[in-house]
Amino acid sequence: MLSEGGSFMKGMAMGGIFCLGLSLFGSFSPATEHGPGEQHHHHHVKAPSKDELTRLLDGHVLDLVNQVRVSCIIMVQPKILVHWAAALDTWTKHCDKAVFYTSESSKALEAVDLNEKDDWARLRKALNHAYENAGDLRWFFVAKATTFAIIENLKHLVLTKDPEEPFYLGNAMKSGELEYVAYESGIVLSYEALKRLVNVLQDEEKCPERGHALWAMSEDKQLAVCLKYTGVFAENGEDSHGKGLFNSKSVDSLITDSMRENPTNVVEGCCSDLAVTFNDMSPNQMQVMMFGVYRLRPYGHDFHDLLVFQPPEGSDND
């Protein structure tokens, strides 16, 4: 009986220590390494409104359009080959550069084989590779194979943003005191943010490859912790009306939710007209989205967009 009581008390003690550890992690706030001029000034990053674009000189707008080029980093695995093939055949054609990174080699489709099973270690390697091969690209978009992205809307979001400033954008979430960008909705990094990340990745104390925690932390949270050390913080990407642009659900799920919650205004309650991403998409849904976004047109309607983002030269575009 005494030994049973002793075991019970040991269990209680271990449980208490574990809960304390969780509490401490929730309030974890690593020291940042940035000077007085590099403080965090923005939290909600909004796309420019039509009025803002109109106020810009025509020549300036054209310069910006030509300068905003996106490198897409798509994380794949052979076990989801059908999603991989669908992403290759649909939205990634609109990236200025699209590279697929895989956990192991596949004869079916071309990708950079990282030969790494651990999700966080694989993402680190992919980001390092993208930075080393960036060339003149200054915006980086990280996505899973189940994500569908409208790259033109991403370019519109960052059109007036300086990639030499540290931007880390997407669907901003909060876990305890840690703010992070949800991986499922896609992650956007400016060149400066990626440069700082690559530097801190070399520091095993601040940004360990395998992690020192007693429990596994998701890749997006580990990324946020590493970026926070460099003074880069998660920011929510929104349209000019404040509606989120990065979605963690499919269009079908979002419309179903809106039918339940906003039955009198389903479309308005669903998503932004300038949404950048949708997630949890089946290969069939990706093909339907591709048709709806890039092919289907209501005759006689003109949206009077002030900008045109041309497809990458030589690409097979819809």
Image (cartoon, helix red, strand yellow):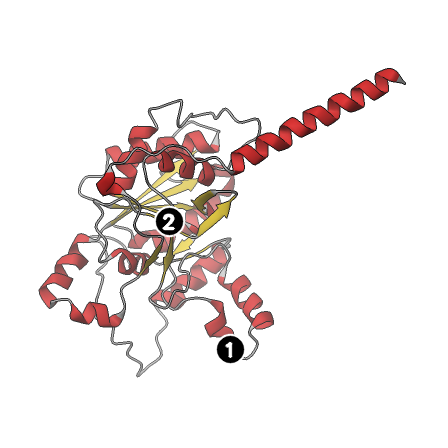
Cα distance between the residues tagged 2 and 1: 34 Å
Task: Say left or right for 88 vs 266.
Answer: left
Q: Residue furthest right?
A: 1
Task: Say left or right for 80 vs 35.
Answer: right
**Residue nearest the observer in this picture, 311 or 242:** 242
**Residue nearest the observer in this picture, 28 or 169:** 28
50, above or below 317, in the image: below
* Camera sees residue 124: yes
**Residue assigned mark 1:** 265
The N terminus: image quadrant: top right
Type of amino acid under label 2:
Leu
Secondary-structure class at tag 2: helix
When asked about the image quadrant of residue 157, the answer is bottom left
Task: Say left or right for 54 vs 228.
Answer: left
**Residue nearest the observer in this picture, 42 or 125:** 42
Secondary-structure class at tag 1: loop
Q: Position of residue 230 (x, y in %)?
A: 32, 35
Check residue 230 in the rendering and tell me which mark sits there, or answer none.
Answer: none
Q: Position of residue 231 (x, y in %)?
A: 32, 39
In this rendering, the label closer to the viewer, 2 or 1: 1
Packing grade of label 1 (10 A; few <14, some 14-19, many >=20) is few
The C terminus: image quadrant: bottom left
State the residue at coordinates (48%, 59%): 285
**Residue nearest the observer in this picture, 113 or 63:** 63
Task: Say left or right for 66 vs 4.
Answer: left
Check residue 88 in the rendering and tell me which mark sits there, or answer none.
Answer: 2
When asked about the image quadrant of residue 31, the answer is top left
Q: Position of residue 7 (x, y in %)?
A: 79, 20
57, above or below 314, in the image: below
Q: Position of residue 107 (x, y in %)?
A: 41, 35
Q: How many marks?
A: 2
Type of amino acid under label 1:
Asn
